[in-house]
């Protein structure tokens, strides 16, 4: 196994990591990297993003601007370039990697997973993984044709978006005008192509957190989750599954992550169907928001696992010490200066933790924190986290 050495931060021998995207997931990765003495430089499109608040340095750039990404890479000279979000100029990452820069997990993984069409064609056409039936549409007329062919209802998503932005469910022809408009305005890169999927009547959906490291491929216990409009609302670990479902889920996760390559953690989203069937949905080549629950349930959270994997360290085992749940804290409206209240009431409940991310502003539905809870059962942990989330209040400090 190749030896790993890490220098002292801010010294000529420092091990530098450039984080592209500085949200709450990146903040936790930054903290874990700094436990090893890694020098972290955080980038985002706005100032004072969560990871910037704990990084050694930060830059505010448009990460969809190829020239801006290159400038900061050439200035900082990182040993590792770590995308924390999908909205990045992935073509520039591919070019940088070809010049010898190290992109986590790979530049191609970042490129494929940013584009729903690309990753779906890899999963369904190249790897033969079970997926929902799908078509693509470039115009409203093509959307109508695709929807009729797939049957109602259909799910409509921009090719490039995240956190449910631009995603909708159309129950009939009458919904398509609204769905098309929302997809054109909610996508990450503006108007453009959409993917149209049959609606899957699944029993549940899970995230199979999959780690590729110097030790090979390993898996966290399955994380169950509930989403609304493509947005994570709550998650729990472990999700109850049959041995055959776990085997099939790990098989799908290994196939897609082997195809993407590189080291790090991957959030593989799967649908669980009757008769122990498993269907691929999406994959993120980075820590997953539903995996926030691992902050309470695992010896090494998904963020700790990601840090170890990308540094080239072996991961001999993944241990879960508790059963737990997470509930997202989301803004109900526009908050110019978010504040959190009710923490004393929250911490009166045993085995509960609250994380406030410290985002400088927020719009409706934006995730500003998370409640974590552990208990003897998933049901008890989720009930506890939900109750405590009701005690915590988010408000605008300027009002």
Image: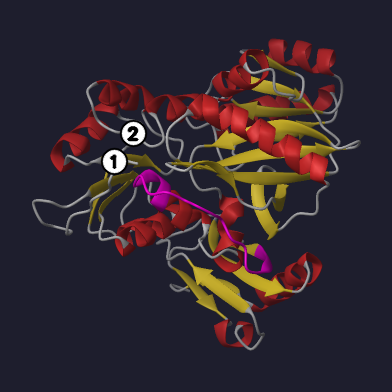
Q: Is residue 170 left or right of residue 395?
A: right
What is the x, y in percent for residue 252?
67, 31
Which of 82/343 is in front? 82
What is the x, y in percent for residue 52?
31, 57
**Mark 2 surroundings: few (<14), some (14-19) or many (≥20) residues within 10 A:** many
**Mark 1 surroundings: few (<14), some (14-19) or many (≥20) residues within 10 A:** many
Q: Residue at horizontal 27%, vertical 48%?
A: 4
Indicate the secondary structure of the residue bearing disc 2.
Answer: loop
Q: Residue at horizontal 23%, vertical 26%?
A: 100
Q: Which residue is mark 1?
A: 80
Asked if residue 145 is positioned above or below residue 358 in the image, the reply reads above
Residue 317 forms part of the magenta stretch: yes
Q: Which residue is mark 2?
A: 103
Q: How is the image coloured?
A: secondary structure
Dominant SS in magenta: loop
**Which region of the structure is painted magenta?**
308-326
- Are dots 2 and 1 in contact, CB under 8 Å? yes
Q: Is residue 86 left or right of residue 170?
A: left
Whether residue 330 is visible to the viewer of this picture, yes or no, is no
Which of 268/163 is in front? 268
Tell me where residue 210 sits by quadrant: top right
């Amino acid at each position: 196994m190749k030896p790993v050495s890490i220098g002292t931060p801010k010294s000529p021998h420092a091990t530098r990591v450039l984080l592209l995207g500085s949200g709450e997931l990146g903040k936790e990765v930054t903290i874990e990297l700094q436990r090893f003495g890694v020098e972290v430089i955080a980038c985002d499109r706005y100032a004072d993003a969560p990871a910037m608040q704990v990084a050694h340095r930060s830059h505010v750039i448009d990460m969809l601007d190829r020239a801006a990404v290159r400038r900061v890479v050439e200035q900082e000279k990182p040993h590792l370039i770590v995308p924390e979000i999908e909205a990045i100029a992935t073509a520039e990452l591919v070019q940088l990697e070809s010049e010898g820069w190290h992109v986590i997990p790979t530049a191609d993984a970042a490129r494929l997973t940013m584009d729903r069409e690309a990753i779906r064609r890899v999963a369904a056409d190249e790897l033969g993984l079970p997926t929902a039936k799908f078509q693509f549409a470039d115009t409203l007329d093509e959307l109508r044709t695709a929807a009729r062919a797939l049957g109602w209802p259909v799910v409509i998503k921009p090719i490039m978006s995240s956190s449910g932005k631009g995603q909708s469910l159309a129950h009939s022809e009458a919904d398509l005008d609204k769905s098309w408009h929302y997809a054109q305005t909610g996508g990450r890169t503006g108007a453009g192509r959409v993917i149209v999927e049959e609606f899957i009547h699944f029993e549940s959906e899970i995230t199979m957190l999959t780690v590729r490291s110097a030790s090979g491929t390993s898996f966290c216990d399955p994380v169950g989750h509930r989403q609304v409009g493509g947005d994570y609302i709550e998650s729990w670990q472990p999700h109850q599954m049959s041995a055959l479902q776990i085997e099939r889920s790990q098989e799908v996760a290994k196939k897609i992550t082997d195809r993407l390559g590189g080291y790090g953690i991957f959030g593989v989203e799967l649908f669980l169907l009757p008769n122990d069937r498993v269907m691929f949905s999406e994959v993120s080549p980075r820590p997953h928001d539903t995996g926030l629950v691992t902050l309470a349930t695992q010896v090494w959270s998904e963020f700790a696992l990601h840090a170890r994997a990308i540094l080239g360290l072996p991961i001999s085992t993944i241990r879960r010490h508790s059963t737990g749940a997470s509930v997202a804290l989301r803004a109900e409206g526009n908050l110019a200066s978010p504040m959190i209240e009710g923490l004393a009431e929250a911490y009166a409940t045993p085995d509960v933790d609250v994380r406030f991310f410290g985002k400088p502003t927020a719009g409706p539905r934006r995730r500003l924190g998370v409640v974590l809870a552990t208990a003897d059962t998933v049901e008890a942990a989720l009930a506890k986290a939900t109750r405590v989330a009701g005690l915590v209040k988010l408000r605008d400090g300027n009002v």
